Image (tube, rainbow, N blue to C red):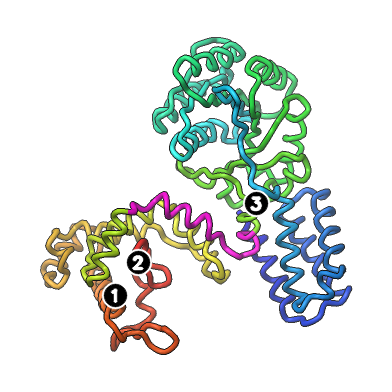
Amino acid sequence: MFDALADRFDGIFRRLRTRGKLTPSDVDEVAREIRLALLEADVNVRVVKSFIARIKERATGAEVAQSLGPAQQVIKIVQEELVATLGGATGKLTVASKPPTVIVLAGLQGSGKTTAAAKLARLLEHDQGKRALLVAADLQRPAAVEQLRVLGERVGVPVYSEATDPVTVAREGVREAERLGRNVVIVYTAGRLQVDEEMMGELARVCDAVKPDDALLIVDAMTGQEAVAVAEAFGETVPLTGVVLTKLDGDARGGAALSIKEATGLPILYAGVGEKLEDFEAFHPDRMASRILGMGDVLTLIEKAESAFDTQEAAKAQERLAKGQFTLEDFLDQMRQMKKMGPLSSIVGMLPGMPKELRQAEIDDGELGRVEAIICSMTPAERRDPSKINGSRRLRIANGSGTSTQQVNALLKQFKMIQQMMKSMNKPGKMGKKGRMQLPAGMDPGALGGLPGMPGGGIPGA
């Protein structure tokens, strides 16, 4: 979503780093360019004015004038103010002193409320050990209840909807959670194509009936700064406590994420970052600011890796690797676990220092599927010892995987190089000057990145 904005900041900072000393005119120039970049990203005008005023005030102050690297200090200021604009600290849900904790979800129709409800339930159940109950209080949209039931089954969370009135459904849903011993209730309410009195009245009655600990507004990130108007309209009727941004993986310009906290005071608690039900995460302002400024997001990447990789299997792979026994079976296992982390493009975007060209490159996730098909078309003996794969076997593997013999040959050649490198790493005296590893004779260093799923020449999890 923030690619265009990240490019603008990258250009601004690149020019800034070439200047040893900043003059007031330099600061004004930087401020103008940042203002233009934010307006092009559809950020609310009030938010832009406040953001630029804070940067100019700090950039012309003593903290920059007395620093050894004025340009670097300005970049630091921009990052800190961007974090503040996005919300500062990471927000959290309120926990009721007496269970169940009640969460009401509101929003316009088409904002992704149904999927967000299921994603939130899954996150609370699988990542935080809660026992959730989904309450379907949207009785306006045809098949809304059935859609929530289907999603509830997929995430393993029960759905309650035994009533014909939204207020009664919500009230009885809380009682059902108490009866079942569920400690979180997520009340999914109806949406409309636009804000209207009927919608607000119904939502207010639901909130009066269940007294929610949190009332979250579901906002489509594609709406840009219009999200501010939507949040203000809902906030006049309902005591909102936070925002859930959906479709943050889209190609919108990011105005909603950058506008809503400062303009409304509502923290962004969660963000939908993909179409899958597991593509839902807590919103961290500092990490998002780093992504926008092209500094990566290592913490989120580590968290994704920890949740995706089987630690016992990774330890076994590491042990076999240390003995020089890493096989195609091990590589297949590691590649499958890496796929759980999400699209390769999103993983690359979290790596710090990645050049713009690579961050924006069209990375074909289907290549992982082709490699998987090739390896799966081999026999177990062939995976453990690829040297047994002769010409006729390569043709059989290519036919079985729907690929060509050239692709099979390329994979086997690249994997052989990786094996040679791994064996070299485990031999004493194979480290060159300054601790750099000496590659086997004839090996092309570029081959380390040749295998899909091995950016930078490393085997995931190994």
Q: Disc 3 marks which amino acid?
A: Pro
Tell me which segment is drawn in magenta.
290-311
51 over 216 or under it: above or below? below
- Residue at 69 percent across and 66 percent down: it is 9
Residue 304 drawn in magenta: yes
- Residue at 56 percent across and 59 percent down: it is 297
Which residue matches tag 1? 422
Q: Disc 1 marks which amino acid?
A: Met
Label 2: few (<14), some or many (≥20) within 10 Å?
A: some
Residue 108 drawn in magenta: no
The label shown at residue 459 is 2
- Look at the image and tell me in which quarter the C terminus lies: bottom left
Mark found first going from the N terminus, 3 or 2: 3
Q: Residue furthest front?
A: 97
- Magenta highlight: main SS: helix
The label shown at residue 285 is 3
Query: Can residue 28 be seen from the camera position used here?
Result: no
Q: Nearer the viewer, residue 117 or 196?
A: 117
Q: Disc 2 marks which amino acid?
A: Ile
Quarter of the view holding residue 417: bottom left
Asked whether the beta carbons under mark 3 and mark 1 sit within 8 Å of each other, the answer is: no
- Residue at 14 percent across and 64 percent down: it is 382
Label 3: few (<14), some or many (≥20) within 10 Å?
A: many
Asked whether the beta carbons under mark 1 and mark 2 sit within 8 Å of each other, the answer is: yes
* Left or right for 308, reference 424: right
